[in-house]
Amino acid sequence: MLIGSIRPVESREITVEAQSLAEIHEKLAAQMPTGWQLSDAPVRMTKGTITVTAVATIVRRDGGREIEADDMPALKAQVPEGWQLVHVRKP
């Protein structure tokens, strides 16, 4: 018997502009839905200005659940479309 932990695989992009990196982080935090985390946020300066732009990638980390099966192929077969298997353990 195996128990697998699964979670949804979903990501979004958020674009923000600000005058500083601290302000970029504040704006991203304000737009972050509950259960999501920042994955990547490269920044670039707009030529000829003091504006900084970030195109952030956020990923969903909530909604996890457990599934059970007798072996690994059966466990993997239970993972729904749009979800990923993140951990497997024996009871």
Image: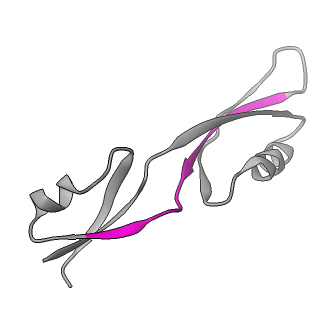
* In-front residue for pair 46/37: 37
Task: Note whether 49 is above or below 3 in the view shown.
Answer: above
How many numbered circles are shown?
0
Point 18% across, 62% down: residue:
75
| Residue 27 occupies quadrant | top right
* Magenta-span inclusion, residue 64: yes
Residue 67: x, y in percent? 28, 68
- Give the dominant element type of the magenta stretch: helix, strand or loop: strand
Where is the N terminus found, in terms of image quarters?
Answer: bottom left
| Residue 72 occupies quadrant | bottom left
Q: Is residue 35 left or right of residue 28?
A: left
Residue 52: x, y in percent? 81, 30
Where is the C terminus found, in terms of image quarters?
Answer: bottom left
Q: Point out the residue furthest to the top here.
A: 48
Task: Note whether 64 is above or below 83 in the view shown.
Answer: below
Task: Note whether 23 is above or below 43 in the view shown.
Answer: below
Point 53% across, 62% down: residue:
62
Q: Point out the residue furthest to the bottom here.
A: 91
Highlighted range, magenta: 52-67
Q: How is the structure coloured here?
A: one colour
* Magenta-span inclusion, residue 2: no
* In-front residue for pair 28/90: 90
Task: Note whether 37 is above or below 55 in the view shown.
Answer: below
Point 12% across, 60% down: residue:
74
Point 49% across, 44% down: residue:
10
Q: Is residue 75 left or right of residue 23?
A: left
Residue 80: x, y in percent? 31, 50
Q: Is residue 79 left or right of residue 42?
A: left
